[in-house]
Image: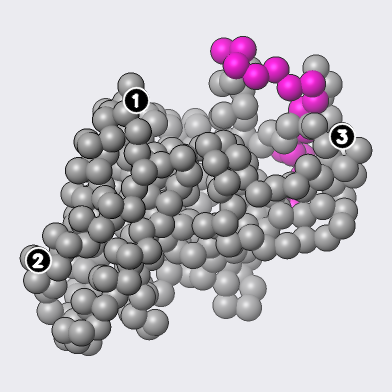
Amino acid sequence: MEFLQPTSWREALEMKTARAEALPIAGGTDVLVDLNFDRHRPEVILDLNRVAELSEWQPANGRLRVGAGVSYSRIITELGQRLPGLAMASRSVGSPQIRNRGTVGGNLGSASPAGDAHPALLAAGASIEVTSLRGSREIPVDEFFLGPKRNALKPDELIAGFWLRPAPGPQQFAKVGTRNAMVIAVCSFGLALDPEQQTVGTGIGSAGPTPLRAGEAERFLAEALGEGDHWRSGQPLPESARERFGELVARAARPIDDVRGTAAYRRRALAVLARRTFAWAWQEYTAQ
């Protein structure tokens, strides 16, 4: 196994261009597990830990650009107020040691349907910045996932970071598992409310071949809040509408039966998570 260790972003891109088969590694919380269990033995590993640019974040033109190497712990402590949904998801990742090493960029690169960061990114409408020697491009997060552990990166591209707006309203994240962290989600759900645009964002994890949005549920809830003038008044949404929102979220899922749970259980759990996260988000909104 060959081990490449660039010290600059330019050098990393040159190495990836020359060795397209090189597997990028940052925190190693996914890659090293596969290596230890001999599930995957890449010929070339591209270690990005010494690339300082990947560990930076900054505001730009009304959005936040977060480098692919920013750890979950830093998202919690440095960006928790700006990106509350992603911070909540980050708190559910592994142990403190894993959160200190693991990165959202690595989570995106693995493209697991159960990635904890993915529902929050989907709900918030993030875009993924990918770069090669040919240039950079942004991919909307709901176009980034192509299948189980498959993403939209071209062979010579690396994930540079991701972009999203500071939260314009309440955001929530919840997952079902045998415990809150240090476990792969049976299913997970992210929610983002935007009172300015009067829109709703959702993200479903571990209940389909890729992370998913619940588009019909988003439109229904936004319309229900608008028709009753709830955005302005802050009045509670009727129980029937909350129930319908949960049903539509469950309908958007494409789960399977596996060792962690059945498809029927995942749909049921997602309906509950959708109702609960909306209740928490609405409580936050009306308390402002």
> Residue, x 69% and y 33% (percent of image)?
25
Which amino acid lies under the numbered mark 1 shown in the image of this protein? Asp
Tell me: 148 left or right of 40. left
Looking at the picture, tell me which residue is in the foreground, 49 or 219. 219
> Residue, x 12% and y 79% (percent of image)?
235
Q: Is residue 185 visible?
A: yes
Residue 19's disc is 3
> Which class describes the residues within 10 Å of circle 3: few (<14), some (14-19), or many (20+)?
some
> Residue, x 27% and y 71% (percent of image)?
220
Residue 240's disc is 2
Residue 258's disc is 1
Which amino acid lies under the numbered mark 3 shown in the image of this protein? Arg
Which secondary structure lies at badge 2?
helix
> Residue, x 57% and y 13% (percent of image)?
37
Mark earlier in primary sequence (3, 2): 3
Tell me which segment is drawn in magenta. Answer: 36-56
> Which class describes the residues within 10 Å of circle 2: few (<14), some (14-19), or many (20+)?
few
Where is residue 2, by image quadrant? top right
Which amino acid lies under the numbered mark 2 shown in the image of this protein? Ser
